[in-house]
Every structure is written in C-alpha cells, then in structure tokens.
Amino acid sequence: MTTATVHGIDDAVRLRNVCRGYGNERNRVVALDDVSVGFGRSTFTAVMGPSGSGKTTLLQCAAGLDRPDSGSVSLDGMELAGLSEKELTRLRRDRIGFIFQAFNLLPALSVADNVALPLRLAGRRPGRESVERVLEQVGLGARSNHRPGELSGGQQQRVAIARALITRPAVLFGDEPTGALDTRTAVEILRLLRQAVHNDGQTAVMVTHDPVAASYADRVLFLADGRIVDELSGASADTIAERMTRLGAWGDSSDGSGTAVASGAPVARGGEAAR
Ligand SMILES: Nc1ncnc2c1ncn2[C@@H]1O[C@H](COP(=O)(O)OP(=O)(O)OP(=O)(O)O)[C@@H](O)[C@H]1O
C-alpha cells in the first residue's frame, strides 16, 4: 500500500490527480496517470522507476517546466495552472533550483560568474559575498576564478549546486544529478543536497536510477507505468534495490495496458547497487 497520496498542509510541492500524455489518439503514451503526491518542506525525496515510467515527466510537471493535461500542481503555495508563462518563468527563477546530469555550466564564464548567473538573469546585482558564501558552502571557495573546464566532474557539479542554491530556492529539483559521477564524488554531492534540506530547510526532489543515491533521501517514491506504486522511508540501498527488482518483475508481467513501458531497458540494478 502506498501513502504517497497523503498530502501535508505544509507541502512545498503538491500534485493532485496529475495526468500527462503524449502523442495522438491512435498513438497515445500516458506518461503520468492520475498522480497525487506531496513533497513536504525540508524533505529529500528520490523518485525511482523503470525507464519510461514517467520520472522526468513528474519532475517537469512539479517544477512548472511542463503543464499537465489535467490535475493541478502547487509550488511553494502557488497554484501553477493559473499562472501565465511570464509568471511561471519568474516563479521558476525565484523559487526553484535545477541540477542536471550534464552540469550545464557556461564554459566561457568563471565559476563565480556561472554561480551568479541566475541572479543576473533575474535583474539582480549579485553581491560578491553571497557568491563566495555559496561557493564556500559547496567547498569551492578557492576556485571562483577558474573556468569550468579546469575542474573535475564532481567539482563542476558542485558549481551547478552552488548556482542552484544562490537564489535560496524553496525547492531543488535534480534529474540524475549524480548520474555522471563516480561513487565517491556522487556521495559528496548527495551530502550537499542533504545539507541543503536538513540545515537550510530546502526541499529536494531527485530522479535517480541508483539505489545508493536514493538511500540518501528521506523517502523514495517508485513509479511504474506513470503511477506511484510504492514508497519507502529511511530505507537502505539494499532494500531499495530489492524493491526495484520487484518493480522490474511487475514490469515484465505487465500486459502493457498501462502504456508507459518504453524501451524494455533493464529496470533493476539488483545487488549491483554501488557502482
Ligand atoms: N516529448 C515527448 N513526446 C512523446 N513521448 C514522450 C515525451 N516525453 C516523454 N514521453 C514518453 O512518456 C513516457 C515517460 O517518459 P519519462 O521521460 O518521463 O520517463 P522516465 O521514467 O524519466 O524515463 P528514463 O528513466 O528512461 O529517463 C515514456 O514512454 C516516454 O517515451
């Protein structure tokens, strides 16, 4: 049984009966099928599931990057449906931080200028101290004048986290933020995310395929065929991997009516949790 549909009053992000499909009537893919879930303030949630189960679509709808066909999304107390594109852009800029697998840094800018970019885009003048402070926070105080190309992958991802944190967003969304990193470096990044959540009161939602990464979250949601089918709290990587294996078995036995099984890519990592 899943409790994912229970919403707290104080959720930083809340989805209610969200449906999102692609294609036309003959070729319909249901990416999200009546998903209701809340992400409480100052919590860290990992979203897992087979390839094509709807994880990225869930993240994009939750972050206001994609609009659901039906249902509603509220973020930091604002209903997204009523907002114009301009208001939505402002909300994303001011209240959300994004961290992607490909760090998406601008190679020609220094580390400090990359971090300051969201503030400049918002028409604010970034104070040197606030940039230095957030770089210290991610352990890169000495690197502010370097170019991203002079940093390791893990350091570049830390710059991306600093850039996401500079606006003090209510919610941090990560789509495979540790996907391109080795295990040790991934752990550093996950600790930073936990810190942002538990020390600074931010809310983090992270899509991952890695049970070890997911074990750093307070809660793990499991998606299959566009629906939340299970969740775990405070689980170990082994427990999460075992649950993924079961999810894989469910995927194999599916009659396909759920629609969203995409590529037949392997689902579970089983015991291979720590890459
Ligand atoms: N722009 C799009 N056009 C058509 N179909 C799409 C589009 N985006 C997603 N889909 C489909 O919706 C379903 C869910 O996709 P989504 O990317 O959310 O899955 P996912 O769980 O993130 O997958 P993965 O782990 O492989 O990244 C898939 O069947 C996918 O093919």
Image (cartoon, helix red, strand yellow):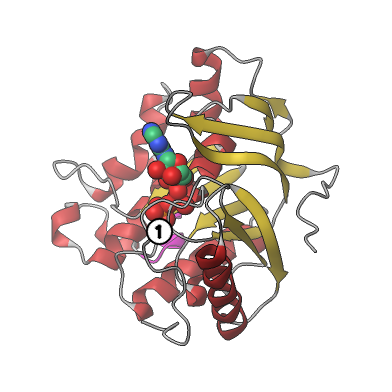
Depth order, front residue of 161/262: 262
In the image, 106: left or right of 24?
left
Quadrant location, ligand no. 1: top left
How busy is the neighbourhood of tag 1: few (under 14 within 10 Å), some, or many (20 plus)? many
Q: Residue at label 1?
A: 177
Q: Amino acid at mark 1?
A: Pro
Q: Which residues are magenta?
A: 132-139
Q: Is residue 206 above or below residue 15?
A: below
Depth order, front residue of 245/11: 245
Residue sitting at x 53%, y 38%: 30
Residue sitting at x 55%, y 16%: 87
| Label 1 CB less than 8 angstroms from ligand 1 | no
Residue sitting at x 66%, y 78%: 235
Q: Quadrant of residue 46?
A: bottom right
**What main secondary structure does the magenta stretch of the protein show?**
helix
Q: Quadrant of the N terminus?
A: bottom right
Q: Tag 1's secondary structure?
A: loop
In the image, 156: left or right of 244?
left
Count of all numbered marks drawn on residues in the image = 1
